[in-house]
Amino acid sequence: MKPDSALLRLARPLPDPLPEWPRVDVATSLRSAARAAVGADGLVLVADGECCGVVTVGGLLDALAADEDPITRLPRSGALRDWLAEQLSYGREVSVVFLDLDGFGEINKAYGHTEGDAVLARAAQAITGTCKEGDFPARFGGDEFAIGTLRPRAGAESLAEHVQDSLRAVGLSAPTGVSGGRRDSIREGENVAATVEELLRLASLACLEKK
C-alpha cells in the first residue's frame, strides 16, 4: 500500500455492503481518479489486490479544487508529484521539464502584483497550449512552472524548446531544465516518492544552471 497516496488521504472506511463503484488503485492520481468516477458517486480503493477504503465524488472534487492554483488555473506542485508517482507506480517512463520565468521579480516591483498575476496567467496559457496528451503542466511555485511528461528524453527536450518558443511569442522568456526519460526497465523495490523528488531536483538544478 502506498503510504502517502493522495487518494488514501481522502479514504473513508469500507462500508457494508460495499457499493458497486469503480475500483481504482491507491496510486492513482486525483485527476485520473476523477475521470474514473464519471457517472458514479464514488470509488473503491484497492491496494495489493485488496479493497482498503472508499472516496466520494464530493471529496474528490474538493481535493481537486484545493490543488489548483487560482491565478494560472494549473494544478499545484502537489498534484504534479502525485501524477509523476502514479506513472512511476505503473512502470511508465517519465521526464520533467522545469521553467523559471525571467524578470518576474522586477515586473512585480515595477507594476505590482496585478500585472504580475497577469504575466503568470499568460505564461500558463502559453505552456498549456504547447502540451499534449501525456503531458502534465503545473505551477510549481512563485515564477516557476514544471511539466511532467511521458515523452522520452529527446521528446522532453523538444517540448522544452517549444515551450520557450511559445513564451517568446507572448513576450516572455524562461530557461528550462530537463530530467528523466532514460530508464530502460522498471526498478524493483523503487522508492517512488524519492524518485519523484530527485527528478524534480535535477530538472530544477539544470534550469538554475542556465539562469
Image (spheres, rainbow, N blue to C red):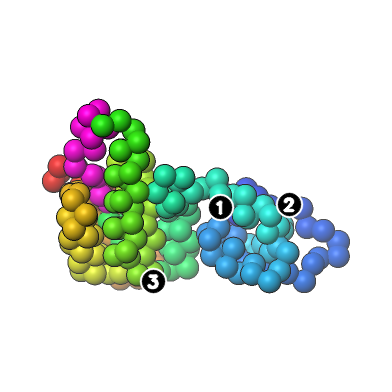
Return the x and y of residue 110 as percentages of the image width and height: 22, 29
Front-most of 115 and 17?
115
Q: Residue at x 43, y 68 (%)?
A: 91
Q: Residue furthest left?
A: 210
Task: Please state which amino acid type lies under the numbered disc 1.
Answer: Leu
First in sequence: mark 3 or mark 2?
2
First in sequence: mark 1 or mark 2?
2
Q: Give me the C-alpha separation between circle 1 and circle 2.
A: 17 Å
Q: Which mark is residue 12?
A: 2
Return the x and y of residue 42 as percentages of the image width and height: 71, 63
Give the structural element (helix, strand or loop) at label 2.
Answer: loop
Query: Can residue 58 be seen?
Result: yes
Give the structural element (helix, strand or loop) at label 3.
Answer: loop
Q: Quadrant of residue 186?
A: bottom left
The residue that label 3 is drawn on is 133
Give the structural element (helix, strand or loop) at label 1.
Answer: helix
Mark 1 or mark 2, which is nearer to you? 1
Q: Residue at x 29, y 51 (%)?
A: 123
Q: Give me the C-alpha separation between circle 1 and circle 3.
A: 19 Å
The residue that label 1 is drawn on is 64
Front-most of 98 and 38?
38
> Do the CB atoms of the residues marked 1 and 2 lie less than 8 Å apart?
no
Task: Please state which amino acid type lies under the numbered disc 3.
Answer: Glu
Magenta-tinted stretch = 98-110
The reply to whether the magenta stretch includes residue 100 is yes
- Residue 164 left/right relative to 130: left
- Residue 131 left/right relative to 13: left
- As displayed, is residue 118 above or below residue 29? above
